[in-house]
Structure formats: C-alpha cells, structure tokens
Image (cartoon, rainbow, N blue to C red):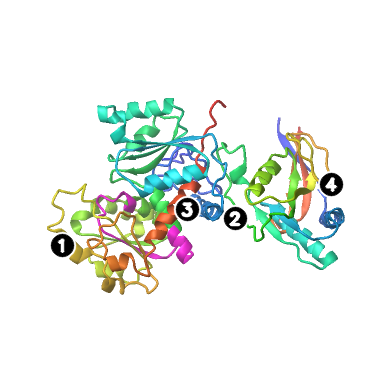
Amino acid sequence: MIQIANTGDPFNLVDQSFSKIVGRRHLLDLDDFSREEIEGIVENTNVMKEVLKRDIKKIPTLRGKTIISLFYEPSTRTRVSFEQSSKILSADVINVSVDESSARKGESLYNTALTLQAMNADIIVIRHPHSGAPHFLSRFMDSCIINAGDGSHAHPTQALLDIYTIQSNLGKIEGLKIAIVGDLLYSRVARSNLWGFTKMGAEVVLCAPPTLISTDFLNKYRQTDGHPFSSVRIETDINKALEGADVVMALRLQMERQLDGHLPTLREYSRMYGITPSRLKLAKPDVLVMHPGPMNEGIEIDPEVAHGANSVIEEQVNNGVAVRMAVLYGMTTPMRGS
Amino acid sequence: MTNEMETRTILTADEIRRALTRIAHEILERNGGAEDIVLVGIHTRGVPLAKRLSECMKEFENTTIPLCELDISLYRDDLSGGIKPVMRPTVLPVDIQGCKVVLVDDVLYTGRSIRAAMDALTDFGRPIGIQLAVLVDRGHRELPIRADYVGKNIPTSRNEEIRVKIIEIDDVEEVVLLRERHL
C-alpha cells in the first residue's frame, strides 16, 4: 500500500511518471510498485553492493534512526539481514522476539506496536503469522512499517532480492520465462514475486498440485486485460512448467501451515513436484535455480540441484543485505522533532 | 498574478571550455605538476567536468590523471525528504591514500554537498589534501567551505536558480540563471 499517491487505478496503483524512487512511508507488498520504482531499487542495490565490498562497511546514512524488528515468527536470514543492513547504515537496531516480550503475557499487537512507537521507533520491521498484520499497523502508526513476511500474504523484500538476483545474473527480467514450483497456496514469497516478476515483464509459469494453488484468485485477475497477471500460466505438470525456463524457483513446502490434507504423502509430492537433476535438463542450460529458503532438501528440491552449478540460492541470501539497505534508504523516515 | 521564469545565460559552451582549461592550468600550477593528483567528480555533473579536466591536463603534461566518480546520497544530512534520487555508482579505481584529491562539482552553493563528499572520501582513505574545483560559485555558504578553483563567481539571491547543462547529460552546453519574474 502506498500512502502518498493514490491514482485510483485498480491495476497500476502508482503513477508511472515517477522517475525517482518514491519516498515510501511503508513497504507492505509489491502490488503498488511501479516498474520504475523496482528498477530504482535494483540500481540502488548495486550502489549498496559497492559499500559491502569496502574494508570498513559503515556509512552514516541512517545515523540517529531507531529500527525495531518485531518478529512473531521464527526467522534466520530475514532477521539477520535486516539487522546487518540497518547496522551498516548506522541505525540503532533493537530486536524484539515474541518469546521474550510482553506478547507472551497476552499483549495485543496493537498495544505492543504503540509501545514501540512511544519508544521512538522510526522504522518497525514486522513479521507476523497473520496476513495483513503490517497493513493493520500502517493504518495508525507514525513509524514506517516494513513487512518482513505476513502469513501467506506477502514478503516484499524477498521478492526484491529475487528480482535483483535474476537481474544481476541474466541482465534483464523482461521476456524471461520464470517457473515457480511448489506450495503456491501458502507461499508469501510466491505472491510478492508474482507481482514483481509480472510488473517487470517476465513470463511467469506457476506449477503446483491442484490442491496447493488458488486458481480462483488467479483467474479473476488473469481474465482482465492489461492486468499484470493476465500473462501468467498455470501448469500442474512440472515437466511442461520447466520446459525452456530461464529461472526455476522452488518454494518451501510450508509444513507448519498445512496439516489440512492437501497432499496424500510427502513422498508423492516429492516424486511429482521435486526439482531433480533430470527435470532440470528440460530448462535452458544456464537456468538459474532459486529457493527463498529454508529448504526442505529432498522434498521440493534435490540436494544435488540445490548445491549444483546452476544454483544461486546462497547468492540470494548474500544479496538480501544490499537489497534491504536500498529499501531502508528509500523509506521516508520523517525526522523527529521537525 | 502569474509567475514567469526569466532565463539569462551566464556561460556559453565556449566560455565553459575556457574556464575548464584555465582551471586545469591552475591545478597543475598550484600542485607543481600532475604527480599524485586524483580527480574526483561528484555525481551527476561533476563527473563529466572532472573527465574534461583530466583530458586537458593530459594534453598539457602528457600523463594520465586518475579519475574517480563519487555519489554522496548516502552521506547527505537532509535525507528525510520524500523523494530520493536513484543513486549512481561510486567508482574509485585508485587508492586515494596519500594522494592530492581534487573534488569537482558543477555548482558551489551551501557547501553541504562538499561536506558530504569529504565525509565519503575519508571513508576510503586519508588523502594528503583535498582541493575543490567548481564551475560556478553562487555564494550563500552555510558551512566554512571555499573553492580552490572557480570557473565563474555569480552573485545570486536565494530565490534564483543556477542550471548547469553539460552536453553529455543535457544535450546542450551552457550555464543559465533562472529568476521568477512577477507579472
């Protein structure tokens, strides 16, 4: 959601004429990003990569700002890379994990957020198991809200780092065939990536068992001319999905979210939808293999593929820091007291 | 009441060329030659200006002067604004440790960009000196900073605007003064 410009256009929520990065109050999802804004973040990420190569990795950009990360779900890479990127930009970082906070005593999200705001948080990075929790906070908070993953809804910084990783390896996104395979029903990464990839002009193929894909949701958009999703293809046969792909992204089977009997057995899922070396041969020879992590190796992705020559999975993690630095730089952080 | 912008040309393409040639000579004179000099252009328009100075100096002294590009967005002290420019890459192909750095920018105004540029430079090393070359000095300093080499001093008022247009970026080459005229 964008707070400063609303053009009333249901598909492209951002004025395409913005030639610069819009100073965002909040980063909630990629649905309201323009292509230009995404490209701006990609360019700024390149600048941040240069900073990461220096001997002294410290720049004064966010000096005096307080960033609080509020995690209601476990996380390694997202939390660490937000913390690292904030510290390189000289912000003061405070980590709140729910197990050690008053949320354990039953404090509501609303009250916890107000407490943190009262402690002068300029930016709040939140991960929450419920879809929409960051949107809820953005409605009443003065602090900038960054969504670090909410339920099965969105994970915009992951999508931005995926876009950056593809762009830096293949030089472009437009016209690429990107296959996203796996748990599409619960994957917030897939949802944010779908917005990002389609806005950048990629040809996206979604592949999952029929029980793990929300066809109704997609069809509503796919049948609308001009909507970014109108070019999205859905396949239930993984061999068709991988054929000629430039990028293959495997998604984690979200075991913690799905005990609802979507799959007969894990072994069957793995046999029918796992990315194996022989299946990968159907894709282009220089295909990029991606995974947002953490991986269930041997289920959605074969270890040989995950650590093979085409894999950029570690690079994704590595890019996470630079992308999040670019995001933090791009946020409008109103100067306190002015 | 309508407002109209009044435009006045301050420097033509030829005058810019002559000013840069003079500055190149001055840099060489002050430093006793080209040894240990590194030119650092500040994005955006300082970069092509630095390149031209290095070309002039190469012609005069027959040695190549190292050329760097510096983006200062990350070091600004006014970052809380709403719209931020896309950053440009910082490129320092040489170690500036122990060098005489000449910062190059198009307009010297409040001095805040130069302050940011000096902060950025010192993150890369400790030059033995930093000098400043600008095409236009328009006054109104907010920090104790002055230029060592000036193309032209132009006294302005704060509500006027100086636009430096460089052929590589703007397709024309001139310096103009914009003034709002009340009708």
The chain holding disc 4 is B
Residue B152: give its label.
4
Q: Which label's residue is closer to the chain start, 4 or 2?
A: 2
Residue A25: x and y in percent read 47, 37
Q: Amino acid at mark 4?
A: Lys
Residue A267: give its label.
1
Circle 4: element type: strand
Do we see residue A337 in this rendering? yes
The chain holding disc 1 is A
Q: Dot 3 corresponds to which residue?
A: A35
Q: Dot 2 corresponds to which residue?
A: B89
Cβ atoms at labels 3 and 2 below 8 Å apart: no
**Structural crowding at the residue carrying mark 1, measured as other residues with C-alpha within 10 Å and reported as few (<14), some (14–19) or many (≥20):** few
* Alpha carbons under labels 4 and 1: distance apart: 76 Å
Q: Nearer the viewer, mark 4 or mark 1?
A: 1
Residue B26: x and y in percent read 86, 54
**Structural crowding at the residue carrying mark 2, measured as other residues with C-alpha within 10 Å and reported as few (<14), some (14–19) or many (≥20):** many
